[in-house]
Image (spheres, coloured by chain):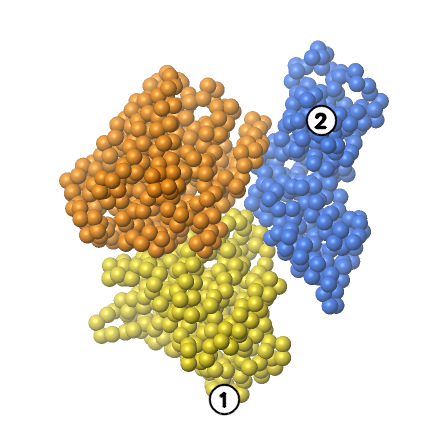
Amino acid sequence: MDAAGQINKIDALLRACRLMLRMSKGRPDARKSELLYYQMLSGYYNRLLKARENGDFIAAHTVFFPSEVMYSMDIVPMHLETTSWMTALFLGEYGDLLSAGGELGLAGEICSPHRGLAGAFAIEALPRPDVILWSNMVCDNTAKSGEMLMKLTGCPGYFLDHPFQGSQGEVDYLVEELSDMVAFLELHSGRKMDWERLSLCVERMDRQIDLLRQIAELRKAVPSPFHSQGFLELLTIDYLFAGHPEATEYLETLRDELAEAVGQGRGAVSQERFRLMTLFLPPMYLIGFLERISQEYGAVSVVEPFFCSWGEGRLDPGRPLESVARKSYMLPEMRMCGPLDDSAIGQIVDSAREYRIDGAIYYADIGCRHTCATIKLFKDVLDEMDVPVLTLDCDVVDPTVTTEEEIRAKLERFFELLDDR
Amino acid sequence: MTTGASRPQPAGLRALDRFRKVNETFPKTDEILEYKAQGKKVFGWLCTYAPEEIIHAAGALPIRITGYSHETDLEDGTAYFYHNNCSFSRSCLQLGLKGEYDFLDGVVGGSTCDGARRVFDLWHAYVGTPFHHVLTVPRKYTERAHRLYHDQVVQFQRHLEEFLGFCIADADLLRSVDLFNESRQLLRDLYEFRKLQDPPISGAETMEVLNASFHMPKELFNQWLAGLLDELSTSPRRYGGRARLMITGSITTNPEFLRSIEDAGGLIVTDELCNSTRYWSDPVLLDGYSTPLQSISRRYLNNFPCARMFPSDERFDRILALARDFRVDGVISQIIRYCVPYAHDLPLITEKLNEAGIPTLALDVEYGTSGSGQIHTRVQAFLEMLESRRQQWTPLDR
Amino acid sequence: MPDNFAHTLALGVDVGSLTTKAVLLENDRVLFSSVLESSDTAELSARTAVAEVLAGSGLSAEDQVYIVTTGAGGKAVSFSRESKSITTCLARGIRYLFPSVRMAIDMGAESLTVIKINDRGRLSDWGNQDKCAAGTGVFLQQMAKLMQMPLEDMARLSFKAKSRAEVSSTCAVFAESEVISHIHRVPPTPKEDIVAGIYLSMVHRILTVCKRVGIEKDVAAVGGVARNSGLVSILQEEMGFEVLVPESPEETAALGAAILARESINKGAS
């Protein structure tokens, strides 16, 4: 509890991040990149916690939101879904937030990160931001969450309308939307957009995407050098620190570590037995458990097509807003959020082959309708390649939907199936 | 005021029987099959953001893709969609998988909601139709959004022309606009009857008309509806009820659902659904400065909003206006499980309606539900509550 | 550890929540099998089943037996040499019984599992329905209580149905309340129609899982509930083709476990 006696999740998250950092420092085998990662996370939450004291302007925003815009205006961002996940991941608690969300009248079918977010604001477990920024970049839940949040916080808000298909006309529309958003932020924050800074950001993002591609290449090695749930670090880096210099440092460090491991033939687990493809997100509160399973069974997630495979293209620092717009279509996740065309299917096939996977796990998040609608499609595609797929019913943050025991039992059955082939 | 138990059955309406027959035989109705037999083309659309006039102007028949007219087991739909997608999208896909829409030459849709867009993805992968087009639909009403949507509509027309092998003339577009506007006006006229204190047509009967409106050639529909309006204007039929109700929410196409509410004594005088006012509300306005496509695209984006649009107040204000115009005593919201955009809107619109002095009942349904025991019980309780409220208020207080 | 594997017999034990099944193999032939009510602990259930099977085949505890366990209690048996998942065991068992089968529906007491077997007889996929009891033996027992008749009578009665009453397939609780409404309707729905409706609702649940993994012929039904000829008949009707049912369907997983034991023995002997 903070001085005001309120349950402050940010404070708890910060302490958890600092604890993770201390623990990592205490481990002789800890990666330098891991330390950087926890340092960055601690910095992020510390900044958020101190924002009011420092007279900073806080902009809460939904996932994939171009936080580089806020960075270039020296505005403190609060990434809503990631904060949601981290609460489940580090604190293992979410029930109070979900109940509060339910009490607002939000149906149970609304995905738990969003229900929990609204609940968090309702019970003031998150600091009140200055503005709410949201977009439809993923799904109906992100698109519709903003107005309730505005009501709960009393903040002004801006909805960034992200067109579905990414044609030139649609990118142009998005650039204008972004432009309006900058004007909105300037108006409410009293801060001016530093276009130079945004250009530099774009330049760094271009480099960072290149590094992410290199890391993806390195993970193709047998044995795979990156620990099983490591892709979550990569996601977080992009979601929270895109364009920041620290992100470049992290990615370069990680890239070098992986290159060294590959050079020495060193894998993330002592005996790699199963190379897996991960489709969609594992439950956040089970990450530690899944890492242990990974070590126990020698099962490594080597590729996550919709989180780690970036689209083609370069970013031009000379056209910062347009680059920000283009980047939003290059994101690996957008392949699942746009029309599911042959390129998305092709992604699965190519990844399965290039990463030499033995099986795939689909985390069927009960709150995520549009991703679950792809289960059969991807399963059929992988079936044709003789790659078995395990579908795990779960919820990304709500631990009551399934248990460790249930997941363990299904994973064991699956590993047995893979072994038996 | 008639109660449900002793409600006399009004005389039948000839036109209504004709509409009913179309609905019962859909998708492979006589009219559609005859259209195909003449060598013409049929295009299926999902969601109110697909511009029908363009299809019609190309000499093809636009029909709306809907699911089974009743609640049924959706094994195939669920197998492809997984169990956490709305039963409407599962139902539509299942009919497609079973070949019930195999007469379609094409499908058109917008990037409207997650369920709808996945219907298109899965349809493309597993059902397959010769022509397939998805329009990007912005979520805003700004000038910029109108420009984008207009571009999308132009692209759709071009793609259609390419597929059909000829150009669609502006004159044909204008003729189609006239025809569709006529439909919209006739439906508006139909709803005017429902504004009466004792309307000559029930909510369930209106649903039969609505379902037919997008499942048959507009020319014929307009004729039949004009005939129905004639019958109504001279008919002695009257419906009463314990309270005047509005139904809002997701799509619902099973008249049994409305009938079960009306049998309990609730008179449904208006509705706000994907297949009712949100479908036909606004006419295409032609003015001297725009091209037909500009007029069409403007109308479609500005039309009575789906919950996907921003800001929600546009939808909420229209709902309140409907409630006032039709002098509604209460609002029943029926939202299909996993219909996320409407679920997000629900607490917000409920608050607004309550603030305006209109009580609400929220029902959690599956697509095609007929209104089982539990729903009936809750409706009864709601009607009792509305009746006791009415006793506390004089008409002037409202 | 026996040196001479040649004389070791293969024994598979499926420790379920309601019943424990054991199958003893000699070479490739089933020597003896048994089905017993499960005891309070998996250990005791397994011990009793093994004793029964050994006694029934005239063997003694000194004879060499290689035991593989499976089922809900499979892991809790101290004297088991190996514990394998039910799905792997089912695949082996089905392959032995019907080599042409590519999809098997296991209808147990509390869960419904559909497995896919590839051309080489290996498990390639499976689907579950364990959140809701509407597709299982426990559900049928509850229905039998409601209908106030034994399970066997229910099955026989279903063949007399002229139509099938509407019974929800979404949820066991809904199904139960709907059956009650049918019984109390005025006039009441004919009992045979209600039973047929109950079976149809179960079949819909089963088919949803089947379609998720992809229906592929030949199809078999195993597990205790497969003995219900009324249910199997409606399943066949809805599928549109014959469904193969082994003589002792509830022993399929135990048989598969025994086959896996045989494989381990052969590996050890070579």
User: Would residue A168 appear left or right of B321 to someone viewing this image?
Assistant: left
Residue at position x 21%, y 37% in the image? A201
Measured as percent of width and height from the top left, residue B173 is found at 32, 71
Tell me whether the residue at label 1 lies in contact with that at label 2, contact meaning CB atoms closer than 8 angstroms.
no
The three-letter amino acid code for the residue at tag 1 is Thr
Measured as percent of width and height from the top left, residue A36 is found at 30, 27
Q: The orange chain is which one?
A: A
Q: Residue B286 falls in which quadrant of the image?
A: bottom left
Tag 2, which secondary structure? helix
Residue at position x 72%, y 65% in the image? C185
Q: Nearer the viewer, residue B325 or B69?
A: B325
Quadrant placement of the N terminus of chain C = top right
Measured as percent of width and height from the top left, residue B52 is found at 38, 67
Report whether mark 1 lies on the same chain as mark 2: no
Of the chain colours in the picture, the one used for chain B is: yellow
Q: The residue marked by circle 2 belongs to what chain? A: C
Q: Nearer the viewer, residue B245 or A297?
A: B245
Q: Give neighbour class at mark 1: few <14, some 14-19, many 20+ (Cα, 10 Å).
A: few
Q: Nearer the viewer, mark 1 or mark 2?
A: 2
Give the labeled residue for mark 1. B234
Of the chain colours in the picture, the one used for chain C is: blue
- Total marks placed: 2
Give the labeled residue for mark 2. C43
Q: Residue C114 falls in which quadrant of the image?
A: top right
In the image, is residue B317 above or below residue C207?
below
User: Would residue B196 appear left or right of C197 to someone viewing this image?
Assistant: left
Q: Residue C33 carries which label?
A: none
Q: Is residue B190 visible?
A: no
Give the distance between the C-alpha atoms of the residues marked 1 and 2, in whole angstroms. 82 Å
